[in-house]
Amino acid sequence: RRALAVRQAGADMEAIGRVTWRLGRVLINSGQPERGLEVLERAVAELPDDHPAYAQVFAELARGYLMANRSAESILDVVDSALSVAERFELMPVIVQAFITKGLVLGLHLGRRQEGIALLEAADELAASARDVLARVRALGNLPNLQLPDDPHAARRSGEAGLAEALRIGAGGQMTYLPGNTMEAMFVTGAWDDALRLGAEFSVETISARHYIPILSVTSTIAALRGDRDRAASELEELKELLQGITEPQISVIGPNTEALHAFAAGRFDEALRM
């Protein structure tokens, strides 16, 4: 925040944009999406819409709207504004991030999975050509969300490729959703032991609670289906405790979904359907 104030005093638009989107990202990633969005929205209102910094901030704002579960229309409006400026100034990192966000909106919010997959794959190729490993990790880590219903094996390959890229550069902190997404693909394809081995590499001490919850969902469900009632119950209880205070819909829904799978595993089919 102090850096932003200094830049604003000197009216350095490029630096303002750079500091603002980073501050917004830190706040959003740390579970403070509304504070992050406030920072980004204020910057969008103040920056000239024909400046490169505008595109960078707008791309991050679109990502923030996606994580805050705003309407698909509002996200697409923002991401297209970012793309229109980024294309003009050939801002490849911004284009890549905007492609990822737009692909996720199309695939997850609007059910247009093939368009979403195409955009994420294009983002991965552009990031690879630009040697932007973190962007590749984001693209590959989100592809399983869209690939899983039609091609779970492709979803697993994407997730494992993203994990490999993150590990290759020592960016373990950037994995976030990657382990859970990859483990879900392993679960669907029957590679349960592989999923358990991957899950054992993480704990709530090494990854944030909101990203550990999907891992617990998979491991506890496998335990329930294999009849390991003690482990299943223990991990389900831990999952429910971690969910307390979580407001993100895409995370909080994991609780009832996991409970439904546990009920199914125990033969309580009517209960599973009600959940």
Image (cartoon, rainbow, N blue to C red):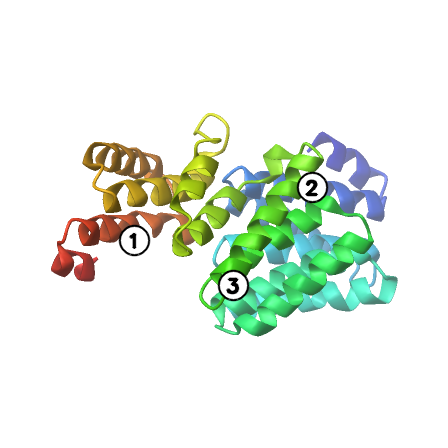
Q: CA distance from mark 2 to mark 3?
A: 27 Å
Q: List the residue tagged with mark 3.
A: 146
Question: Residue 240: x, y in percent?
Answer: 29, 39
Q: Which mark is residue 248?
A: none
User: Amino acid under label 2?
Assistant: Arg
Q: Residues within 10 Å of mark 2 (few under 14, many from 20)?
A: some
Q: CA distance from mark 1 to mark 3?
A: 18 Å
User: Amino acid under label 3?
Assistant: Leu
Q: List the residue tagged with mark 2.
A: 22
Q: Is residue 231 visible?
A: yes
Image quadrant occupied by the C terminus:
bottom left
Q: CA distance from mark 1 to mark 2?
A: 34 Å
Image quadrant occupied by the N terminus:
top right
Secondary structure at badge 2 equals: helix
Q: Who is closer to the viewer here, 129 or 55?
A: 129
Is residue 261 toward the left or the right of residue 78 in the image? left
In the depicted structure, whether residue 140 falls above or below residue 8? below
Q: Residue at x 86, y 61 (%)?
A: 90
Q: List the residue tagged with mark 1.
A: 257
- Say which label, 2 or 3, has the lower sequence index: 2
Question: Residue 194: x, y in percent?
Answer: 45, 42
Q: Residue at x 36, y 39 (%)?
A: 216
Is residue 90 toward the left or the right of residue 249 in the image? right
Q: Residue at x 30, y 47 (%)?
A: 255
Q: Are marks 1 and 2 in contact (CB under 8 Å)?
A: no
Q: Residue at x 19, y 57 (%)?
A: 272
Secondary structure at badge 3 equals: helix
